[in-house]
Amino acid sequence: MGRCEGEGANGVRRVSELAAELSLHWGIVLGMRQFLASSPWADPEEEVRRLYLERESNFLNLVRATVFSNPVHPYAQMFRLADCRFGDLEQLVRSKGLEAALTDLRRAGVYLSHEEFKGSAPLVRSGRHIPCSTESFRNPLAPAGMMSVSSGSRSRGTRTPKSTAARLHAEAWRNIHQREWQVEDRVPAALYPILPSTIFLTAGLAQSRRGRPWQRWFTVVGSRAPFSLHALATQAMVALARIHGAWIPFPTFLQLNDFSPVARWIGERKREGRSCAIWGFASPCVRVAAAALELGLDISGTIFVTGGEALSEAKRAVLARAEAEAIATYYISEVGCIGVACRQMGPGNSVHVHEDEVAVISWPQQMPGRGAEVNALLFTTLLPFAPHVLINAEMGDAGVLETASCECLFTRLGFRRKISGIYSYSKLTGQGVTLVGKSIVRLLEEALPARFGGGPGDYQLVELEGSAQTELLLRVSPRTGIRSPEPVRDWFLREIRNCYGGSLAARSWRHSDGITVVLAEPLMTRGKILPLVLLNTGHRESHEAQDVSGR
C-alpha cells in the first residue's frame, strides 16, 4: 500500500511539473508574439536619458502606487515600523537625493535580504514578523509578458514574467551597448543554454530585430540533449520565432566537455578575414578560448560579451592569451540589467550602472559567525514596468561604487556611476566554519591552476549534506592531467589556512575527513560552471552526478 501511495504521489508531482512547464512555454509564446508585434523605441538614447533624469519621480510614483497604497505590503509594514509616511519619503528624496535617502532607509530597517526575498528566511523587523514570499514583491503595474528564468546560481531558477515594455527598454539599451562596444561589423553568435533558461530567446529576438541576427547558436549540453523535452521545446520555440519573422538559429549541441567546435568556427571566420562577437556566460566563453589555445587556433580580435557570473582576473587572463577581448555585463533576472562595461573600462569586473532603472547603494555586511565584512550591494527598482518592486534588496553580491573616469558613450549619456570588483559572497558554512566566497574563488581559479595546471573552470568546490555531516567535494577536471587526488587535497588544506577563518576550517575538515578530492568534471548549473556550488542535496545523489560527469 505504501508503495502504491508513493507511486501515486510521484505521478501527481510529475503531472504537476509537466503542467507548470506547459504553462511556462505557453506564456513564452504569447510574450514573444506580443514583443515581435511592438515597434522599437524610435530614439533609444533620448528615451534612456529622459528616464535617467526622471529617476527620482519614477521611484516615488512606483512606491506610492504599489507600496503605500497597499497597507499589507511587506515594504508598507517596514515603512510604518520606521515611522516613515509617503510625504516623509518624498521630502527625504527631494532634499538628500535618491541614494542618500535609500541609505537612511536601510539604517531605519527598510531593506530586504536575499534569503527573505527567496522565502528561505523569515522577514522580521523591530521584533515583528512580516509575512511575505517572492510573489509579495511582484510589480502589479507591470503586466505579465515573456518569462525570464534566472540561472539559479544560489538556488533554483526564479521565473519572472517581464512585460513587453521592459523588453523594449532592454532592446533600447542593447542598441546603445553595441554602439559603444563597436561590434556592428563583427559576425554575431551565441553560447547560451536551452530551456528552461530563456536568455537565448530574449537575446536572440532582440538581436534579430536589430537586423544583426546570430549566425550560430552553440549550447553547452550533453550528446543526448537534442532528444530531451527541454531541447525539443527549445527547437519548437525557435521555429515559432521564425514563423513570426524573427531569425534565430537552431541550437548546435556541443558534446560534453568539448568546446572545440566553437573555437574552430571562430577560427574559420578569422581565416575569412572576419572577427566575431560572442555572447555567453563567462565560463563557457573562457573554455572556448582555452580550446583555441590548445588547438593552436587564431581567434584574435574576438569580443566575448559575458554575463551570468563574475569575470574574474583569472578568466580574463585566459581570454587575453587568446588575444580576445572580454566585456562584462551584470544582470539579475529579478531586478533587471544592473550595468555593463564599456570598451575603456579595462581589467577588473566593473560596469557602468543603468541608473535609469536601478539605484544601487553599498552596505557593510558582516558574515554570520565571523568578523569579516563585505560591501554588500543593495538594489532598488525605479521603473513602472520593473518585474519586482524592490527597495534596498540584497542579492548576495558585493562591490565598490565609484565614479567612472572614462569618456565612453555611457558617460556622455550621463551614466558615470560604476561598480568595480563585483563578486558573489556566497559562503561555505559547513561544520560551523564560515568562509567568504571571494577568498575561495581566488584559490580555485588562480592558486590551484598555478600549482597543478589547468585554468578557471577546472576546479570546483561543492558543499553537500552527507549521511552524518556536511561534506566538501573538490572536483578536479581530468583535463588538468592530475593523476592522484591526494597531493591536491593536502595542498588545498594547507593553502586554505591563509583565508579568513581558514585555519579552523583546515583543522575541522582534516579531523572529520570532511573534504574529498575527485577527478571528475565540474558540475554545470544551467550552462554555468561555478567555482562554488552549494547543492544541499543528499550524499547518494551528488555522487551519482559525479559519476556521470566523469565518464
Image (tube, rainbow, N blue to C red):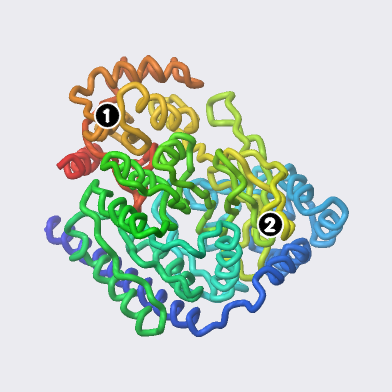
Disc 1 crowd rating (10 Å Cα; few below 14, some 14-19, many 20+) is few
Q: Residue at x 37, y 36 (%)?
A: 456
Query: Could you say whether the residue bearing mark 2 is in a helix, strand or loop?
Result: loop
Picture coordinates of residue 258, whole percent (x, y): 24, 48
Identified by mark 2, the residue type is Glu
Quadrant of residue 532 within the rendered picture: top left
Image position of 107 with respect to 307: above or below: above
Q: Is residue 117 left or right of residue 419?
A: left
- Can residue 344 be seen here? The reply is yes
Where in the figure is residue 442, as x and y percent of width and height? 45, 29
Residue receiving disc 1: 468
Q: Amino acid at mark 1?
A: Ala
State the residue at coordinates (39%, 78%): 29
Q: Secondary structure at mark 1?
A: loop
Asked whether the viewer can see residue 471, the reply is: no
Q: List x then y, in percent, for residue 146.
A: 46, 73
Q: Residue at x 18, y 40 (%)?
A: 550
